[in-house]
Amino acid sequence: MKPIWIVDDDDSIRWVLEKALARENLVTRSFTNARDAMNALQSDTPQVLVSDIRMHGASGLELLQTVKAKYPGLPVIIMTAFSDLESAVAAFQGGAFEYMAKPFDLDKAVELIRRALDESLRESSVEQSMSETPEILGQAPAMQDVFRAIGRLSQSNVTVMITGESGSGKELVARALHKHSPRASQPFIALNTAAIPKDLLESELFGHERGAFTGAQTTRRGRFEQAEGGTLFLDEIGDMPFDLQTRLLRVLSDGHFYRVGGHQPMKANVRVIAATHQNLETRVKDGLFREDLYHRLNVIRLRLPSLRERREDIPLLTKYFLNQSAKQLGVDVKRMSEPALQFLSSLDFPGNVRQLENLCNWITVMAPGQTVEMPDLPQDLVPATVGAVQAPVAISGHDAPVSNHENLANATTVNGSSLPDKSAYRSGESWVSLLEAEATAMLAEGQSEVIDKLGRCFESVVIKAALRHTHGRKNDAAIRLGIGRNTITRKIQELGIDGVKDE
């Protein structure tokens, strides 16, 4: 995590904030004037910026203007005197996250900086780097047609509609369209419209003003603002509520929108790529989707084939996913035997590429040998004559510390997190059944405090999984888990978890 910058010409203010934030294990960098902070912005950026409004030389408002022009998502907290209400209003109009009146309560100041920090990390999590975008793999003729279409669209800003079954890789195609477009250096922002509750989707798309509704303590940028100059990918567009379709149509028509609770029109320079697994023509006929919006989105249609239409790509994809899974877990790469690979290539995979990826994650953890044979595959996949899947290694050492429950940890991580699509297949034993077996064994041995021991094990597994996902970044892991930073810090210490980065 980047440091918190403090800009104030008052030595005592800087000292107090530095010490208070240091007690929270937060790194700070201080400046005595706004001009030095502006110069530092040429080569570095903070996670949050806290600045006085009146200083010698350039003012805090000038610094705010400079920051917002270059880094619109960076939260800026302005400090001002009680009587300086006009400046406070100017700060909000300039895009400040919040202002603190001097003299301020130190605990409340730290709490406010924490809120700004959470917002900053949320912004960072949605603005994903294109360098991390995986390439689309495929040698089948159907995929070659997709590659040719991406090539033809490479110098265009035209709106694209991607259709295809769930799990077929529509977001990867959208990322590729962005990566090879004139907007490649700008943000790519993805939003699954079906995954956001209806009452929150409008704010998620267009942002909201402070006080727009209960709980709106600060102004928040929506996905359109986050994607400014770049590409906004709207997945499962067919599930968008009808009233929001009207607002989206207006943005596509004239390029303007309003934040929730706002009165100032915002201009959007955004390329929209939409995707759906539904038949939009049918939804238009049923009155569930606006026909005018359908025509606005359906400028260029790109159909993505299902995995059963490109079976020849299954060996290539399997090898890729096994390598990726082994790399993430820090283990040796599993190899598929020829009969097992031929068998996988014969499957329909209703969950498409996502299901194959989940299966490769399962194989990496659960298959007993380095070469994966037919009996090693999940029981529900293979014919009954091949034999049941081999059971995972029995868990031993019930009195051992949490870190010794590695088999339970692996099973929980795989079946609980990496395999969300359980409708298509199911492993021989779920993590719930493993947990039940462990609890039964501990009770049979007469152990006490069973819930406490298993609870610690469960927390350790989930936190470790989150830390692996965020590459050891504690704050990001806390956000993913939905817990506070102090909570995850305490639990890491209590559970003796290693591999945490200092932030």
Image: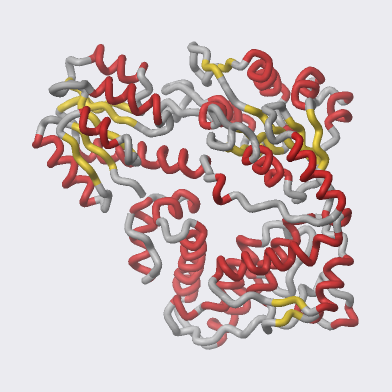
128 and 292: which is toward the camera? 128
x and y percentages locating residue 447 in the rendered image? 48, 83
Tell me, yes or no, if residue 203 can be seen here: no
Identify the image quadrant of the C terminus: bottom left
x and y percentages locating residue 47 in the rendered image? 35, 41
Q: Is residue 42 above or below residue 214?
A: below
* Tally of numbered tags: 0
> Looking at the image, which residue is at 60% across and 77% down?
332
83 and 267: which is toward the camera? 267
Quarter of the view holding residue 394: bottom right
> Looking at the image, which residue is at 83% across and 68% down?
344
x and y percentages locating residue 169 in the rendered image? 73, 48
What colouring style does the render use?
secondary structure
x and y percentages locating residue 264 in the rendered image? 48, 12
Compared across the picture, whether 436 is left or right of 52 comes to right
Tell me, yes or no, if residue 318 can be seen here: yes
Q: Is residue 222 above or below residue 189?
A: above
Compared across the picture, whether 98 is left or right of 292 comes to left
> Looking at the image, which residue is at 74% across and 79% down?
372
Q: Is residue 56 above or below residue 442?
A: above
> Looking at the image, which residue is at 27% across and 20% down?
61
Quarter of the view holding residue 196: top right
